[in-house]
Amino acid sequence: MPDSTGAAGSSPVVPGASPTEALPLTPTTASRVALRRLAAAFTYPEFRKLWMGACTSSIGTWMQNVAQNWLVLTLTNSAFYLGLDAFLGQLPVMLFTLIGGVVADRRDRRRILLTSQYVQMMSAFTLALLVYLQVVRPPDGTAGHAISMTVWYVLALSFLNGCAQAFGGPAYQSLVPSLVEKKDLPNAIALNSIQFNLARIIGPLLAGVALATLGTVFCFAINGLSFVAVIVSLIVLTVPPRTPLPPQPMLQQLRGGLSYVRHEGPLLGLILVAFVTTFLGMPLITMLPVFVQKVFHLGVTEYSQMMAFQGAGAVFGALIVAWMGRFPRMGSVALKVQVGLGAVIAAFALSRVPALSYALLFLAGIGQIVVFSLANSLVQLVVPNQMRGRVMSIYMVAFRSGMPLGSLTAGYLANIYSAPTVLVGGGLLLMAVGLIVLTTYGRLSDI
């Protein structure tokens, strides 16, 4: 972070402040300036609309994520199926997101995003109905000790959600920069991270209460209803017009995006950081139910609390990024935080003290969101608007494909060895990759 003090004998000056703000600050004025720095993107009305709708929907999504993980473990008693569910939910991202990026550059991004939300809403209501009608249920008389074949309904709906996200994701990533000025783009990305991770706190806590009192049906139904908020915000959103792509075959435009990324060295480095961090770092979340049940011998309440601690750390990390805004050597900071994240994940895997594990999850949340926000901001700042959909789709393939591949690999290895062993190995590898890139790839460290 830039130095926030003035010369000797002068009054404190807020880093990055305008000339009118670079005056002696009273506590009240300093608080007001700090708030403006943290919430710069909220001064744009259209961004506020989208943020509020997305935040409401994200809370419902996290309620479903927690309930669905618990449901899958109840149906199968298998870490592998937890990983498989995460894999199938992200597989369409690997298969279709590049096409989704081309579509986002060719078509109305708001309409694409609306269609994605409708599909995900119907998927949530369908799962709620299947569980309510007991089409999806544990095997009779052996719940938790055998695999229920009804888990395949859950897996199929996860795949459908992934298909919707493969097209909605590039459209969303491309839409946000059109709602704010470039100077406030890192702040907007950080605020998006805050809404997502606020949902990671609120959603699991609400899910814990709902699971203990009302069951999984309620979580899935609430998620379906939550999509109404983001759908309404998209309907009333006013998006600035943009110059459409010249008429070209879709494959040719896709190749153009790939060629642009290939010849922009820092973009390749950022894509590597995104993939490695999700591949080696996100299994921490996927394996969390296994730690709660098998290592700590606790229940769903403690599981939701651990998820909330990790989410709280992510919010804190996003606040840090929002405060810092755009600053020199963002790439170097991202790599150093990646190294620290690997150490925290390994420490969590070795911890057998719940209180220490809660603290480590908080730190892991900080590390994950700082790396993700900085990498995303750098990509968005580098890429021109006419290429944004395609470049962000390539970035998303790396970012999102790391999650299912990492979860599937971790779930498979956890059945052979153990979840703690797998996370220790992943954390150490994450540290090693971060150190190697930091010391050998100067172009990324310098941006």
Image (cartoon, rainbow, N blue to C red):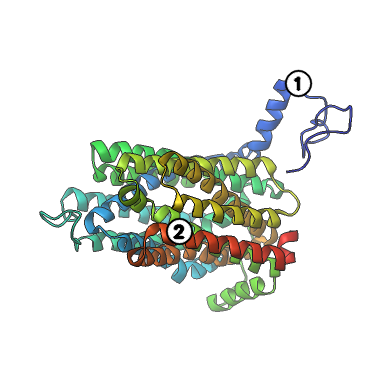
User: Which secondary structure, mark 2?
Assistant: helix
Extreme left residue here? 141
Q: Which circle marks residue 423 in the picture?
A: 2
Q: Quadrant of the N terminus?
A: top right
Left or right position of 272 against 293: right
The amino acid type found where label 1 is placed reads Thr
Front position in the image: 352 or 413: 352
Point 72% across, 60% down: residue = 445
Point 66% across, 65% down: residue = 437
Res. 104 visible in picture: no
Circle nearer the viewer, 2 or 1: 2
Res. 138 visible in picture: yes
Classify residue 152 by image quadrant: bottom left
Percent x, y for residue 427? Answer: 52, 59
The amino acid type found where label 2 is placed reads Leu
Gap between marks 2 and 1 measured at Cα = 48 Å
Point 47% across, 57% down: residue = 282
Q: Is residue 263 above or below residue 42?
A: below
Percent x, y for residue 263? Answer: 69, 74
Percent x, y for residue 306? Answer: 41, 42
The first of marks 2 and 1 along the sequence is 1
Q: Which residue is mark 1?
A: 26
Decide: few, some or many residues near mark 2? Use Cα within 10 Å; few <14, some 14-19, many ≥20: many
